[in-house]
Image (cartoon, coloured by chain):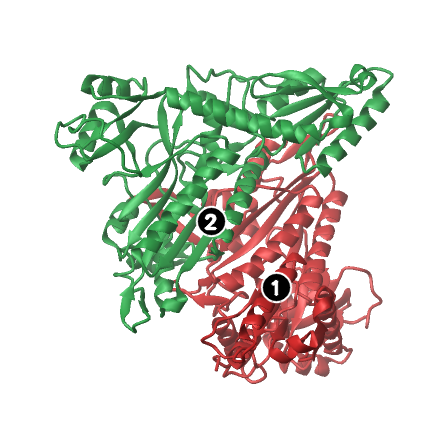
Chain colours: A green, B red
């Protein structure tokens, strides 16, 4: 029998998460503390994500580039809040070969500074704008908190977009357009409902005017920031002297954005859907969408095997990521468990009875639904996979929405957050001080402020009682 | 008029190379010494290369992964020759945030050690083999020689394949299969003739039993190692304890290979074909294959523009990477120069006369050929691009072959190498000492030993007079 999962998701979500990821061979620990290995099955999910996102970015005219992975300390220090935040979490290179370096180099914790150093040479005129750049790279940040696969590690993979515009409005529009692409990705590909909003003053990116966030709520009423898109204003273009001659021949500073989405999204998706049997993958992100398992051991074996291959080939032609497991050393039962552990969205059984009846038995991983598919209607599987995908998103959306509690009652707010009974939505003053205190008392922080104007739940801040400025969502971070 | 190239390729190949790459916006310098920036036009060539190669690898069953970018010193040290070679060229991380680390971490100069550390956990049985892994990553090596765009830098992009097998023969077969894929890539996509051979004892990879190399000869009779594929034997599997239970239930060490190709190949291609007007790109690697330039300034402008767009859209549908430059602020002459500088394989002119005649004027960048294409036969452009591609490869092959001199005369050998009059092929003893002396006297080294048995040119070594073991090619490195 395949390795079964010992930890229960309900009881010990971290233990369960690690066990599932390791047994399903998604990731592995490495010999470097806080760094993990992306195994083929996990990396393939990242490749699928990249393919989707890269296409969307290119449709907007974004071009890919590659900038040095090492950033001299003086460059990182050019924007005040930026260096303050990142210098304590950078990995510093101090030696090249056997020579001590004159200046420390940080492995990129994010690339604003090294990229904007070049933009000051590349941008001269309004004709050079907009400039829309992106890179797919690794990032190193020296986390001191306990690390977690995908969600918090000393190294992760992401893309970082860096754009420059003539006006504030264009920059704002770009930041918003991108966070919408991120939302589409999370919902269409990962089947995870996601919320667009603004980060609070305390939570926004070091050096941004404002940060759009794509927020996701997790089982246990935790929250996770799945992606961010920042409006940088002229905070970087001024110290980096990124200026252009406008059509009236006057110098102006460019308005910038930066935006990123990372491998964290895979961890979020695993947390949302996994169960005590293992992963449950939405079809659009699944490296294997269909597993074909021949039921062998009768006189019909040869026919079953050749028919299994034919089915596989036909599904391949339909563009389905399909695998046939015809290994004779493992039993069908072992295989059923194995591919449930790996979260394969749907399995097809090919046996003697099935072939006699001209149909296949299928089982859906997500809801356990069983049924038969006519052999002469294999193309209905594509439809079926799409249906599973949208069902997963819809059910997840219902769950998430039912966990959000709108409140005007301070006690309910505090207890709700502390005990993670709900995601709390309340009127808020937005001050850093108030947020610090909320965190101190509840371990939770503000997750986002709805980007569109909303009627205030109350005119007073739920926590400090001062004048409320907006509604906000609060939860503990995973 | 577009910026023209001031350096002549014949007179100052390095000055010319830098100027062309900078003016065509392929790469740029960065503020980090020895590190360059891959601009959109340059990075796109890498994306095209990745797409071709990744597909070929996957057809062999290779799976992509991602391993930590930082390698603890004790891991790097597990294979003796490996640490000796790489420790002096590693960039060392010694601080995480504001804490000194207990052990130095090298940014990967290559990933054998960090990957094989995991393989020792992943491989248990013959059923886990072969294991075929690859990653697309950045590499840092602290070059002390003067750096060059693409050809020698402190950071570059590459893929590194790492495979484990049950037998020596399988490993050997894999290393050879891969170097053949590299050759196909260089010739089919880059149009650069390339030679497969073996590296000498002195030149082989630190830790390999043998290294296959894909060697390319450059203008000025320089040589460059475009890619390598190493047979590692059990040199790593022994210290890393990568063992499997065979079918007889006995423990055996795996046989390994590692192989890589990098952004260097782009530099090689630029050197081969570029001329005093700029880049000359083979169609299959060109980010823009066709540039459409409308000849404006008559009453027919509107018609010319709409027709230009129609032509662009039709070519897009045919899968051609095409761009229409309808900017009204630049003259056609400026554009002609600009896209010649950028090496676009073919330009199409759309003017009043052309439309009247129902045909387009074209010019081929590579050989300057001019002619007309019937508007109703636009699909012939695809064929034309293929023809340019094969013509470029064939002409380059002729040039390269005519620069190879087979000799049995020591004086000719020495003068030929010193003055870079030829690439020299001669009988050789293969010893490290002899190779050191050749380099001292001529600045050249052995490039490769033909992989297939050949009749010896002489039974004595061309240089030291000892018994010759094989024929070898010699040249100076670029």
Q: How many marks?
A: 2
Depth check: give the residue in front, A205 or B67.
Answer: A205
Q: Position of residue B209 (x, y in %)?
A: 67, 51
The secondary structure type at the circle numbered 2 is: strand
Residue named by callout 2: A137
Secondary structure beneath dot 1 equals helix
In the picture of the structure, the residue carrying the numbered disc 1 is B310
> In screen coordinates, is B224 left or right of B38?
right
For mark 2, name the chain.
A
Quarter in which the N terminus of chain A is drawn: top right
Q: Height in image: B299 above or below B180?
A: below
Query: How far across and how far down the image is residue A459, in percent?
Result: 16, 29
Q: Viewed as shown, does residue A122 lie left or right of B257?
A: left
Work out how far the residue at label 1 is from the one at label 2, CA to CA, in angstroms: 37 Å
* Numbered circle sitting on residue B424: none
Residue A393 sits above or below residue B281 on the image: above
Which mark is in front, 1 or 2?
1
At horizontal 32% and vertical 36% (from top left) the residue drawn is A144
Quadrant hosting residue A69: bottom left
| Residue A265 versus residue A124 in the image, above or below | above
Residue in the foreground of this view, choosing between A256 and A247: A247
Q: Residue furthest front?
A: B299
**Which of B370/A326 is in front?**
B370
Quadrant containing the C terminus of chain A is: top left
Residue A75 appears in which quarter of the rendering?
A: bottom left
Q: What is the x, y in percent for residue B3?
A: 47, 80
Q: Count neighbours of disc 1 (C-alpha within 10 A) and say few if under 14, some if 14 to 19, many if 20 or more.
A: few
Is residue A97 visible in the rendered image? The answer is: no
Could one spot residue B11 in this view of the protein?
Answer: yes
Q: Residues within 10 Å of mark 2 (few under 14, many from 20)?
A: some
């Amino acid at each position: 029998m395949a390795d079964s999962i010992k930890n229960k998701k309900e009881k010990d979500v971290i233990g369960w998460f690690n066990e599932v990821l390791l047994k399903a061979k998604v990731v592995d620990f490495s010999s470097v503390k806080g760094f993990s290995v992306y195994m083929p099955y996990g990396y393939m999910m990242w490749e699928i994500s990249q393919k989707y996102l890269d296409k969307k970015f290119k449709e907007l005219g974004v071009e890919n580039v590659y900038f040095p992975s090492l950033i001299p300390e003086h460059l990182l220090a050019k924007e005040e809040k930026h260096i303050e935040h990142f210098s304590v979490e950078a990995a510093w290179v101090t030696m090249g070969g056997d020579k001590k370096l004159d200046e420390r180099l940080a492995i990129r914790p994010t690339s604003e500074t090294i990229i904007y150093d070049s933009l000051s040479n590349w941008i001269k005129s309004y004709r050079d704008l907009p400039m829309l750049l992106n890179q797919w790279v690794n990032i190193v940040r020296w986390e001191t908190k306990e690390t977690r696969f995908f969600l918090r590690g000393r190294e992760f993979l992401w893309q970082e977009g860096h754009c420059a515009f003539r006006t504030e409005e264009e920059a704002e529009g770009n930041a918003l357009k991108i966070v919408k692409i991120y939302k589409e990705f999370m919902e269409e590909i990962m089947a995870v409902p996601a919320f667009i909003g603004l980060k609070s003053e305390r939570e926004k990116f070091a050096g941004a005017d404002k940060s759009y966030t794509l927020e996701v709520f997790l089982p246990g009423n935790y929250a996770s920031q799945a992606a961010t898109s920042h409006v940088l204003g002229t905070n970087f273009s001024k110290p980096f002297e990124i200026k252009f001659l406008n059509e009236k021949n006057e110098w102006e500073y460019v308005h910038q954005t930066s935006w990123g989405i990372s491998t964290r999204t895979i961890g979020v998706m695993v947390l949302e859907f996994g169960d005590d049997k293992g992963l449950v993958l939405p079809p659009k992100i699944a490296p294997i969408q269909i597993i074909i398992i021949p039921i062998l051991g009768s006189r019909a074996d040869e026919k079953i095997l050749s028919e299994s291959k034919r089915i596989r080939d036909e599904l391949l032609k339909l563009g389905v990521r399909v695998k046939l497991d015809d290994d004779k050393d493992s039993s069908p039962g072992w295989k059923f468990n194995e591919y449930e552990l790996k979260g394969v969205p749907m399995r097809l059984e090919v046996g003697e009875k099935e072939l006699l009846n001209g149909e296949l038995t299928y089982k859906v991983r997500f809801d356990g639904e069983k049924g038969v598919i006519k052999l002469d209607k294999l193309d209905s599987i594509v439809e079926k996979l799409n249906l599973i995908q949208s069902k997963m998103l819809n059910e997840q959306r219902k769950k998430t929405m039912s966990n959000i509690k709108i409140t005007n009652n301070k006690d309910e707010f505090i207890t709700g957050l502390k005990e993670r009974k709900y995601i709390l939505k309340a009127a808020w003053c937005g001050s850093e001080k108030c947020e610090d205190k909320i965190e101190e008392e509840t371990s939770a922080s503000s997750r986002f402020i709805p980007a569109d104007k909303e009627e205030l739940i109350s005119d007073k801040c739920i926590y400090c009682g001062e004048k409320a400025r907006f509604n906000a969502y609060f939860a503990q971070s995973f």
